[in-house]
Image (tube, helix red, strand yellow):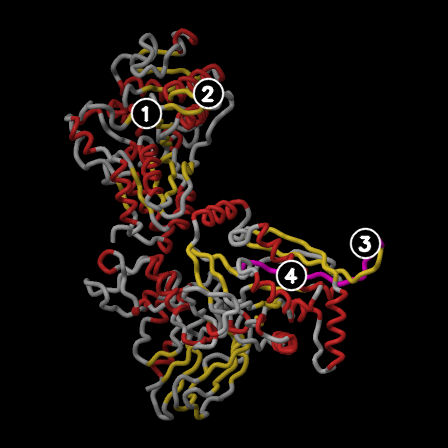
Amino acid sequence: MATQVIMPKLSPTMEEGQLSRWLKKEGDKVSMGEPLAEIDTDKATMEMQALGSGVLRKILIKEGESAPLGQLIAIIGAPDEDIAALLDQAPEQSTQTTRPAEPKTEADATPPAMQTAGDNASRSADRSAEGNGRHAAPVMKNSPSGRLIVSPLAARMAAEAGVDLRSLSGSGPGGRIIKRDIETAISQSKAASPTIGAAAPQRHLRAVETKTLQQPATAGASAYHDEPLSEMRRTIARRLVTSLGPVPHFFLTAEIEMDRAAEMRRNVNALDPELKISVNDIIIKVAAAALLQHSQVNASFQEKAVRYYEHADIGVAVAIEDGLITPVVRSADQKSLSEIASEVRDFAERARNRKLRPEEYTGASFSISNLGMFGIDEFTAVINPPEGAILAVGAMSPKPVVRDNEITVRQMMRVTMSCDHRVIDGATGAKFLQTFKKILENPLYLVV
Amino acid sequence: MAVITMREALNQALREEMLRDENVFLMGEEVAAYQGAYKVTKGLLEELGPKRVIDTPITELGFAGLGVGAAMAGLRPIVEFMTFNFSILATDQIINSAAKMLYMSGGQFKIPIVFRGPGGSAFQVSSQHSQALESWFAYFPGLKVVMPSTPADAKGLLKSSIRDDDPVIFIEQERMYGNKGEVPEDQEFTIPLGIADVKREGTDATIVARSLMVPAALKAAEALEKQGVSCEVIDPRTIRPLDIDTIVESVKKTNRVVIAEESHPFCGVGAEISSEIMERAFDYLDAPVKRVSAADVPMPYAKNLENLAIPTVDQIVAAVREVTYLDE
């Protein structure tokens, strides 16, 4: 039976993909799992694997062309198999090159990576104007009436989150799948994610009583536990949001004397020139150490809870052509300076070539943005939701300061932390910044 | 701001607008010498004289037609119906003349007239005198329909209605004439027609209510808050033109809607709002739109049955619990 190759969902925010390069040509033999093509998503270039074996019978979009998620882009089949029926259902070539002017429908968010011939009859028809993917869902029997009953909102949420409605049983009247069922499914799929295995919860640096740790959806990201919002926290959140956008920012600035950190960097690099440790690497390490002491800052605001992370997964903003991406140094609190340095170098290199994988740039618990190399003295950064804070780092420069009643010259650097006020209060953020400053001014604290 | 009754707020609006524009005059049964069956026109005859405040015979069709003619001739009549139940007799003039004149005269005759008076249920006045007729009038293009729920809204909306160049049906609520609230004293205080008011903000369910059901919806929202449900209460204030955008924005936020109304359910304003929500916010609904309406029977005379026929706070609470699936 022929396998339809459709544009797969390769990143959490992807809506369409551009065919960068076919790795097979028509007539080539293909086996299951073999790389078939390279796809440019909104963030990175990803390999697409074949989900069936046989011969690549037909390529339906050329290199450089784009297709929305779920669109048929190739057919794999037996050498002599009749694929005419499948070809009939493929969209016209022109619809692939010129995108429809109308806003994208969410139909394309349904994620099946492969469909067998036969059940696709309704696909293309259902993609018209308001199509929402749910029309294409086969009639199922998880309601007493024998139909899949789902509220319009729940259907849309499921399509956006890639939740398979057929796997759910509804808690509404008559088995209707409603908003809360989708929310439960999303949180369960995160909790059940097997990707992390036993690694994360083993080493707890802080005393952990009986809290149950959840595993995140992103591979390698920090484990966390959710604490239901207190009434006060809920009120603070509600009131602040009404005053300033969806994420209520406030800003804390500190000036930090960098002489000792700079000296440490020189000394460390003198030990081994290959290390190439930067001041920014030290900042990452120090931030991670401070975050572990201030769990309230290593946190994010969720719909009904504040999420506290076990480790400091630090997003490092990397400017690339046409944009910005924040690869994540996982568990920076447990990594050595040299590990952090080489990891950041590797990330920056691959970010520029757009080769980062989604799990490498999502799910940070805190971020750092450094514009010091552009000579910026200080600035404010915008929080990358759902993270609770971001640290904006300015340039290090010699400045006159007063020490022991005398004017002297020191290397000074200004940092500004943007905090999500729903999670972090002024004093909480200030205490974190105090610790951060204390360690950075005396990096020996890192080893104490 | 002074705290006054809705009756006094309406009286202020009438007096201020009649003093402001000498083309405005008032007529109706018992509005002058008796100062109004509900005393809304108190003191106006004395202050403005018998040319501006006119007692009519008991002939609704007749004086409604007189009003339409006066409006065509350039005056700005306010016609009081002792209650809107009696406007039924005048509907030929309201619907066939007032609503259509601008259109049928090719724009030559505007009809700046206000038909006002109490509507809805009162206290044991039985089937023929306890009717919510807003959906009748809102049905016709050419009419505007206004229903205030607070003294301030009553004043601001009545002033706008009198200044409006189109015929306006202004329906007060007999049970609410004594309700008190803060009302701005500024003579230029008006509230534009066609703008809904969010009477309470919330996140879990939207209650759309008008007139008598607004205070009931606010009480229901208070009760629900204690049960952990946050309700947004929206008062459209103007039934036509309807501010559907404000309602739809709220639905997009809360995903659930209850419409509370004192009228019968079938072909009511709630049915129209429900349909608009379905057309504009289908993908945001987590539950079917739920209406809480008056019983689909003529209003009973007996006190106990009358109480059962008018929507209650408890019914609104139960409807919100239903759309938020709290009892599933």
Q: Residues within 10 Å of mark 3 (few under 14, many from 20)?
A: few
Distance from disc 1 to disc 3, alpha carbons, whole Å, reads: 72 Å
Q: For the residues carrying marks 1 and 4, which lies nearer the camera in this image?
A: 4
Segment tinted magenta in the rendering: A388-406
Asked whether residue B299 is drawn in magenta, I would say no
Distance from disc 1 to disc 4, alpha carbons, whole Å, reads: 62 Å
- Left or right: A336, with B42 as reference point: right
Provide the residue designation for mark 4.
A436
Which secondary structure lies at badge 4? helix
Question: Residue A68, percent across and down?
Answer: 46, 71
Q: Quadrant of the C terminus of chain A?
A: bottom right
**Callouts 1 and 3 on one subunit:** no
Q: Give yes or no for contact between labels 3 and 4 (Cβ–Cβ under 8 Å).
A: no
Provide the residue designation for mark 2.
B2
Which secondary structure lies at badge 3? strand
Q: Depth check: B194 or A113 in front?
A: A113
Query: Circle 3 marks a residue in which chain?
Result: A
